[in-house]
Amino acid sequence: MDIGHLLTIAGSAIFMVFFFGLCIFVHELGHFLVAKWRGFHVIAFSIGFRKIWSRTYKGVEYRIGWIPFGGYVDIPQIDSTEPPKDEKGNPLPKGKPLDRILAAVAGPLFNVLFGFFLAVFVWIGGIPEESPKLSQIEVATIETDSPEYRAGLREGDRIVKLNGKTFHKTWREFVVEILTIIGDVTLEVERDGKTVNVTYRPIVNKAVNPVDEIAYPFFRPKLPLRLYPSAGSPAAKAGVRAGDEVIAANGKKIAGFDDLDLFLMMNSDKPFSLTVKRDGALIDIPGIVPEPLTIEGQNGVYRMGFSFTPQEHALKIERVSAGLPAQKAGLQAGDLILAANGKAFADPMAFPRTLDGKPVQLTVKRGDREFQTTLTPAFIKFTDIGVDFVYLTHPTPWRQFLYVIDMSVKSLRSLGVSLGNTLGLTRAHTTIKPSHLNGPIGIGRVLYISVYRGSIVQGLSLVVLVSFSLGIFNLLPIPVLDGGHVLLALLEIIFRRPVSAKVLQPVMMAFVGLLIAFMLYVSFYDVRRVIGSIAPEAIGISPQKSPAAAPAVPAPAEERTRADGTAEHPEN
């Protein structure tokens, strides 16, 4: 592992801890400043729980806890469960309802303001999307053993409406819309000049994310392959412009990222031409000369020319690349490779890293027949033409805020239906469950991944979401949350007397218990997701059950990335 990689890991971890803590600090700072402004007595201001350091300044004890996922400001005059007292047990005047409302709302308000502040940087920098906004989606592939296929969806269908409504969404936004639909999904598709309605009930797609078990679609879209060249890159020098859609390379049709990736791999460092679509017209761009590239001290890699799905001590070939050793040896999609040079695979994923220029004897199973064949891996040079395959979108701060509002409403609705199903109160269908929520551990993990696999701007976009969500969640009218304090103060204003402590105390204790249980519940699934990403076998997920993943952020450098944003099968 080189120094650059170690610095990336360290920087991502620092980003996660700093910004997660900063979101909490901003929240508590809002409470603190308004409480001081309204004349409340503040006992302590703490970032984290279980104090390891403290210092008292002007009557306030400032604390840092060794458990960093949370924080609090101890303001006894906001508490409605018992008479307020200071740290020495001396009685304090009860806070006025309006002052309590202002102090309670200040925390969430500061989170929203902080979110808007960071959202400006996201707006300027832009965040990557796997596609531009689409008003129709063409089905590129679909699994035959899926509810969509059984309902009648086919390759080549053009989806024009979702549950009776037109759309203008990226592929990711389209998927999120499907995930949060209550009940059946109806796709209106155009096929051979006719309109067909396809209605199905989503089910969990374990191949995409076996840990979370979400109802990701079983079909893939045909997305326009658009290029975004860097300034001064070989592509830019040849005349490629941002947004050019690839049609062909050296006259050969390019149907998607896989085709272009294979062409560049086979073409190596030879000059080539691209045919692109620009403003509705086809344009030929000749003389694109790839530049040699060095990755971790290497200028190339040995490959046999097939992608595979790891099985238990075997490799299942998914695709064979034309012109490379695997095709020349007659290997086919569906073949199982059982051994290399007579040795079974202890770790199938590690096999590509063992290849060099020496011949390899493979034991192959095709149907009921086993045979052996010898291949000499080809050396593929690393080259670069200086383009990205993602679309940068620049959402305004207000749009980012509305997105979080929309997702919060849809998530709460889905969780309410899920709870209703558990209690037998409804039979409405949803695949969203409380286990899909992220607690502090999960949020930290996502923040880390967004920077490690993506960029600082992607990380900031997640911080914006966290900050907005923290503000919105805390305004829910639930006892122990800020919204609960606001509700109690409003009831006191309406009825001109506080809620009885005898009634309030057991209710508060019950909700404290529920909140602790809820945090333990989501933390359990957070830890399960972490373990599942590192050692899936430890939680009962074998490699063959998860042939591909669909990360929300770009994949690490050692993985290739498809144009639709999903990780490709490992390349060999």
Image: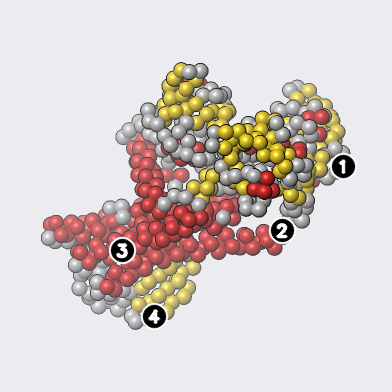
Q: CA distance from mark 4 to mark 3?
A: 23 Å
Rendering coords of residue 444 (x, y %): 51, 56
Tag 1: amino acid? Lys
Label for residue 106? 3
Of residues 245 and 53, the one drawn nearer to the viewer in this rendering: 245
Q: Could you tell me which secondary element the residue under label 3 belongs to?
A: helix
285 above or below 28? above
Tag 4: amino acid? Thr
Q: Earlier in the sequence, mark 1 or mark 2?
A: 2
Q: Could you tell me which secondary element the residue under label 2 belongs to?
A: loop
Q: Residue at x 44, y 20 (%)?
A: 195
Label 4: which residue? 56
Q: Earlier in the sequence, mark 4 or mark 1?
A: 4
Q: Residue at x 30, y 59 (%)?
A: 482
Rendering coords of residue 177 (x, y %): 43, 37
Q: Could you tell me which secondary element the residue under label 1 belongs to?
A: loop
Of residues 346 and 447, the one drawn nearer to the viewer in this rendering: 447
Quadrant hosting residue 41: bottom left
Q: Earlier in the sequence, mark 3 or mark 1?
A: 3
The answer to the question of whether label 2 and label 4 lie on touching residues, with beta carbons closer than 8 A, is: no
Q: CA distance from mark 2 to mark 4?
A: 45 Å
Label 1: which residue? 358
